[in-house]
Image (spheres, rainbow, N blue to C red):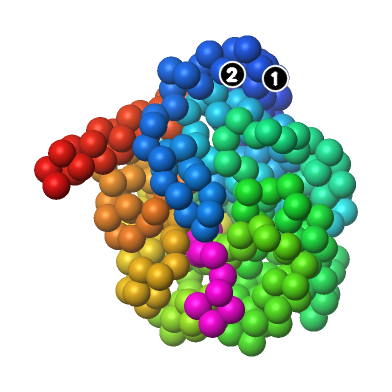
């Protein structure tokens, strides 16, 4: 796959993998071998294991059955915007193989909410979250309308909703994670999401004060959880010379995302389920993310560099650790 341009490789994986691995009989057979049995119940949803496919991989809901075949327990489809949009011009994904990182400047290309909704057919073979965002052309002052539209449409179908206020690739999006903006948005979304659990996905570049504010809003408004983190716009060593465009993911985030999860766990006193994402690439990084306070982990970049066996491997290791901990009690 590495001989192809990154987005072409991704499209191939999604279309080929999606149709072959997602084919019912093969999917069921593979799933019976790959999926670990380490269930956890969060906000009323039973996750079969703790490993998820992070948002952005299955933007258009073409791959979620294949993700189940690979051993994932949940997948976060999206980011979905109300109408189809093409995102930034290509190329917009770059590999940094030495650091096992990606840089992306996608800008939410997706087929739009109606087309994506039509691809969501219950029963799902795994837990399915839908990550919603705003149209690039929607002014920030009206962003809450886009999020509410996403919640209204997907709330009746999805197992959970994630609001993306943390991508660095849509101008001004991250300002929506500010205390006042977040409250306005959540008040609009909470009235239309029905019974669907609602989570917010945060940025690793938020300060401690900003994270504490977001955690307080989440507790005040009785959100169902937080997802930490999205990609980073920072260019700390050894990335100072790298283009400032786009967000970095992969190992550059391993420590920072874990730190954010630990901080949020502390701020919320463990009262709010956390999904840890960022630089999870092996058993150790997954285990440490859970130890920091996450109930689930998600991967994206790790899957690119470690290959399609990653979910099965991580799931098996966490299942084994859970059994050992149970025996020791
Ligand atoms: C190419 C690419 C596209 C992404 N698109 C989205 C997206 O649409 N919405 C979102 O919330 N996160 C998106 N992300 C962020 C991931 O979901 C994840 O939060 C981040 O990459 C950190 O995890 P990782 O280090 O395992 O990749 C994207 C990441 C990459 C690499």
Badge 2 marks a residue whose secondary structure is helix
Residue 318: where, in percent of width, then height?
30, 38
Quadrant in the picture for residue 217: bottom right
Q: Residues within 10 Å of mark 2 (few under 14, many from 20)?
A: many
- Measure the C-alpha gap from mark 1 to mark 2: 10 Å
Residue 101: where, in percent of width, then height?
45, 45
Q: Which mark is residue 19?
A: 1
Which residues are the magenta region? 219-232
| Ligand 1 contact, mark 2 (Cβ < 8 Å) | no
Is 222 included in the stretch rendered in magenta?
yes
- Residue placed under numbered mark 2 in the picture: 27
Query: Is label 1 or label 2 in front?
Result: 2
Earlier-in-chain disc, 1 versus 2 = 1
Quadrant in the picture for residue 13: top right
Residue at point 48% right, 70% down? 205
Can you say whether 301 is above or below 19 in the image?
below
Can you say whether 251 is above or below 58 in the image?
below
Residue 77: where, in percent of width, then height?
66, 45
Residue at point 73% right, 63% down? 193
């Amino acid at each position: 796959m590495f001989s192809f341009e990154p987005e072409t490789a991704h499209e191939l994986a999604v279309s080929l993998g999606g149709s072959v691995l997602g084919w019912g009989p093969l999917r069921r057979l593979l799933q019976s071998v790959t999926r670990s049995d380490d269930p956890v119940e969060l906000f009323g949803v039973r996750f079969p294991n703790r490993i998820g496919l992070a948002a952005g991989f299955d933007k258009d809901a073409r791959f979620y059955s294949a993700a189940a075949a690979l051993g994932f327990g949940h997948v976060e489809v999206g980011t979905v915007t109300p109408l189809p949009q093409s995102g930034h011009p290509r190329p917009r994904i770059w590999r940094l193989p030495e650091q096992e990182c990606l840089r992306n400047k996608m800008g939410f290309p997706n087929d739009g909410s109606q087309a994506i909704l039509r691809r969501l057919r219950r029963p799902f073979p795994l837990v399915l979250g839908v990550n919603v965002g705003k149209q690039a052309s929607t002014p920030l002052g009206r962003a809450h309308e886009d999020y509410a539209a996403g919640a209204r449409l997907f709330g009746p179908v999805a197992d959970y909703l994630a609001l993306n206020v943390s991508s660095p690739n849509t101008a001004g999006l991250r300002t929506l994670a500010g205390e006042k903006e977040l409250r306005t948005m959540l008040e609009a979304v909470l009235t239309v999401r029905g019974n669907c659990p609602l989570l917010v996905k945060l940025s690793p570049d938020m300060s401690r004060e900003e994270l504490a504010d977001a955690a307080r809003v989440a507790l005040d408004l009785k959100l169902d959880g937080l997802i930490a983190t999205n990609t980073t716009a920072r260019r700390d060593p050894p990335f100072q010379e790298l283009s400032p465009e786009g967000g970095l993911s992969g190992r550059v985030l391993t420590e920072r995302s874990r730190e954010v999860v630990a901080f949020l766990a502390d701020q919320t006193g463990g009262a709010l389920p956390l999904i840890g994402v960022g630089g999870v690439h092996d058993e150790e990084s997954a285990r440490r993310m859970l130890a920091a306070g996450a109930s689930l982990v998600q991967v994206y970049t790790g899957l690119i560099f470690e290959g399609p066996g990653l979910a099965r491997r991580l799931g098996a290791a966490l299942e084994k650790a859970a059994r050992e901990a149970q025996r020791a009690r």
